[in-house]
Image (cartoon, rainbow, N blue to C red):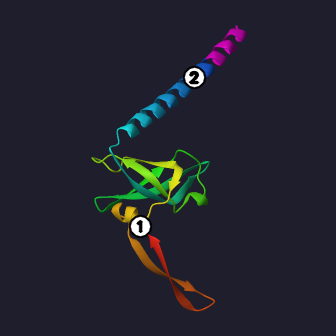
Amino acid sequence: MKENEGKIVFLLIILFFIFIMIFSKFKKEEYNNKIKNYNDKTIGITSSIKNHGKTSDLRYYFYYKNQRFVSESNENNFSEKDLKKFFNVVFDKKNPENSHIYLNEEIQPDSIALTKAGFKYVTYYDYDIPTNTYIKKHKWE
């Protein structure tokens, strides 16, 4: 009797893992189909990483109709080397919060493309302690 109970428990565990694998595959396909329906494309820049124990989320932003939209990607593990880089972003025009960043290939847009995408070239000053002066710097924001 105990032998049959062990086999049943083992079978239930196997079925549970198979269910989880099928469910995760279904969710991934559903997300990929959702991305295919996004109807606009722009340039986005990665800004920060939020760590949650063993996983992490990469925050990025992009502009649409002069409004800044911040979103997160949790597809992979990220590192500091992924920050402040430009990537293609697809999004839904009706609801721009729904977006996806393509991190497989960094892009090197020129200033015209960045300006058309809504970014601004900003001047800021960094304090230099050894020389006791402010150093003028620029960045895209």
Q: Earlier in the sequence, mark 2 or mark 1?
A: 2
Q: Which amino acid, by three-letter code, is at mark 1?
A: Ser
Quarter of the image where the N terminus is located: top right
Q: Is residue 136 magenta?
A: no
Q: Pointers 2 and 1 in contact (CB under 8 A)? A: no
Name the residue: 36% across, 65% down: 115
The residue labelled by disc 1 is 111
Which of 12/39 is in front? 39
Q: Nearer the viewer, mark 2 or mark 1?
A: 1
Q: Is residue 4 above or below residue 86?
A: above
* Amino acid type, mark 2: Ile
Of 15 and 57, nearer the camera is: 57
* Side of 132 relative to 33 (left or right): right
Quadrant hosting residue 38: top left
| Image location of residue 109, percent across then percent down | 45, 60
Kindly identify the residue that appears in the image at 61 percent across and 91 percent down. 131
Name the residue nearer the viewer: 17 or 90: 90
Overall secondary structure of the magenta section: helix
Q: Find the residue positioned furthest to the right.
A: 3
Q: Badge 2, how many Cα within 10 Å: few under 14, some, many 20+?
A: few
Relative horizontal placement of residue 117, taking residue 88 as reference (left or right): left
**Point 27% across, 47% down: residue:** 94
How many neighbours does mark 1 have within 10 angstroms: few (below 14), some (14-19), or many (20 or more)? Answer: few
Q: Which residue is mark 2?
A: 18
Segment tinted magenta in the rendering: 1-11
Q: Where's residue 129, x and y in %? A: 60, 88
